[in-house]
Image: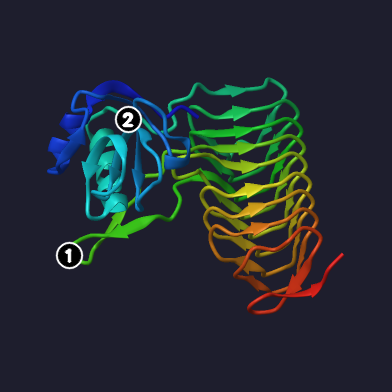
Amino acid sequence: MKKALRSQIFAHELASALGLELIGERNCIIKEIVSVSNAVKFGLCFSKKANDGLISGIVIGLENVLAESLIVSENPRLDFCRALSWLIDNGCLEVGNNEGKIHDNTSIAPTAVIEEGVEIGEHTVIEHNVVIHKGTKIGSRCIIRSGTVLGAQGFGFEKNEKGEWERFPHIGGLKIGNNVEIGALNSVCIGAIDDTIIEDGVKTDNLVHIAHNCRVGKNSILTACVELSGGVVLGEGVWMGPNSSTMQKIKIGDYALVGVGSTVTKSVNPNYTVAGNPAKVIKKS
């Protein structure tokens, strides 16, 4: 999914719009939105902590962050939310602006809603009352069961000075591989900046929720009512038991098994079996 700006903005223009101080190159051009882990020249990102080396591009960050162009903020995540909103409101940034393409032999139920800019591969089946938002790419030979919503905005907010919650506009995409089956009444969100990714061969049961920036490794199984919080990474062949859930940003290694009703609060090594609330290791193999 493209995250390039529709029109170029100078770093000093954005800083002025946010009412913040700019340190460094004033005339650095903002051409795209990136995560700090993928920082590049002409990219805008945010950083909540000091760094060892110079960050490329334009960074909204604390005053001790080293960057080519630093927009100084006491709350970088909040001001990054405001920057995205300002860019969207002023027509500089469009979410989900990739060109769509739906293969001729895809089967789409008449009650399904497919927004512009969606890609769907051959021999994929979209059942009744499915909603697929822009920025979603679905591979070949997939099945999307009834009532599922793909590519919706993720749940991201930051509290402002008044104690009110301001939305973090999610601008990433959703990429679903080949031979994937998504059960009925699932919700799978786009990424905040980088994409949410469902790899080849993944199968999900009914009532599964996959939050923004998750990555589900190939041939993994998510049974009924599984919940993956934001930024969770599953390896290959993971099995998640019914009603299990995770804390955000943890990793579950290849071929790990998570027991029924478990709450996973820490990362899990490959081939481990965990269960309970909080989940504990019950088998190593």
Taking the spot 75% from the left edge, 44% from the top edge, the residue there is 218
Secondary structure, mark 2, is loop
Amino acid type indicated by mark 1: Lys
Specify the quadrant that holds the C terminus.
bottom right
**Residue 86, relative to residue 211: is it above or below?**
above
Residue bearing the label numbered 2: 93
Q: Nearer the viewer, residue 257 or 202?
A: 257
Q: Earlier in the sequence, mark 1 or mark 2?
A: 2
**Where does residue 141 sit, x and y in percent of width and height?**
76, 33
Q: Which mark is residue 200?
A: none
Taking the spot 23% from the left edge, 63% from the top edge, the residue there is 164
Q: Badge 2: how crowded within 10 Å, few (<14), some, or many (20+)?
A: many
Is residue 247 something one can see in this rendering?
Answer: yes
**Where does residue 62 sit, x and y in percent of width and height?**
26, 50
| Left or right: 127, with 46 as reference point | right
**Residue 215, relative to residue 227: is it above or below?**
above
| Left or right: 161, with 122 as reference point | left
Outermost right residue: 285
Taking the spot 70% from the left edge, 79% from the top edge, the residue there is 276
Residue bearing the label numbered 1: 162
Amino acid type indicated by mark 2: Leu
Secondary structure, mark 1, is loop
**Where does residue 29 sit, x and y in percent of width and height?**
27, 23
| Left or right: 70, with 138 as reference point | left
Q: Nearer the viewer, residue 20 or 257?
A: 20
